[in-house]
Image (cartoon, rainbow, N blue to C red):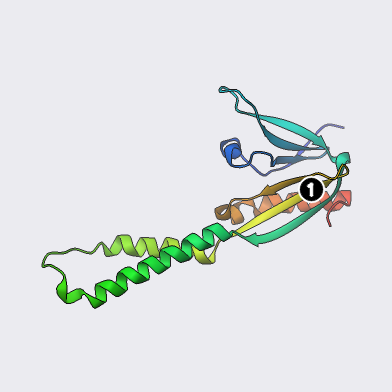
Amino acid sequence: MEEETIAILTSPEEYAYHIGEVASVGTHHLRIIRRKFSIQTPYQIEQVPMAHISRAEYKQGLAPLRIGAGGVLIALLCAIFYYIGVYWDSLQPGTTVPVGMLGLAGLYGLRWAFMSRRHALTFHLHSGGKIRWKSRSGDFKYKDRAVGHVFQHLRRLGLLA
């Protein structure tokens, strides 16, 4: 039977962020990104047969670093607006406040703080090892379809925990 790709979880442009993680899921193999000590081709794809996988787990979680950065940005903006309000009378005439930039930063902070979700798949091997894949926090919606295809394939194989 011929190998068919079920889902591509990581594009080649993202390989640097997913070293040691799953790049794609095929009918008979998982393709894992490994670092290669070469300038021309810094990554190589290693194949792990599905027969070596004992079970798989899925978690839908939050990205704590991104949430923390969003919270810090929102707190910084609140402090800026507070100090502008308190010291408005002592500002020099002609002082400009980039309200558009502050508003844009506020939108980014709110998005990071409240919309940072990610997919996480863990494949357990018979040898006791684990192979993981986590989506980047901004890619949750974009990876939904690929993760759904992986779900269906793992359920057919009876590997999903």
Residue 126 vs 47, above or below: the answer is below
- The residue sitting at 81% across, 44% down in the picture is 129
**Secondary structure under the numbered disc 1 in the rendered image:** strand
Residue name at image x 31 percent, y 60 percent: 101
Disc 1 designates what residue?
Answer: 123
For the point 28% across and 65% down, which residue is it? 99
Q: Could you say where residue 117 lies in the image, as x and y percent from the top left?
A: 60, 60
Quadrant in which the N terminus is drawn: top right
Quadrant housing residue 7: top right
In depth, the one of 153 and 84 nearer the eye is 84
| Residue type beneath disc 1 | Phe
Please indicate whether residue 48 sits to the left or right of residue 88 in the image: right
Whether residue 115 is situated above or below residue 127 in the rendered picture: below
Residue in the picture at 44% in, 64% down: 72
Total numbered circles: 1
Residue 123: % across, % down = 79, 48
Q: Residues within 10 Å of mark 1 (few under 14, many from 20)?
A: many
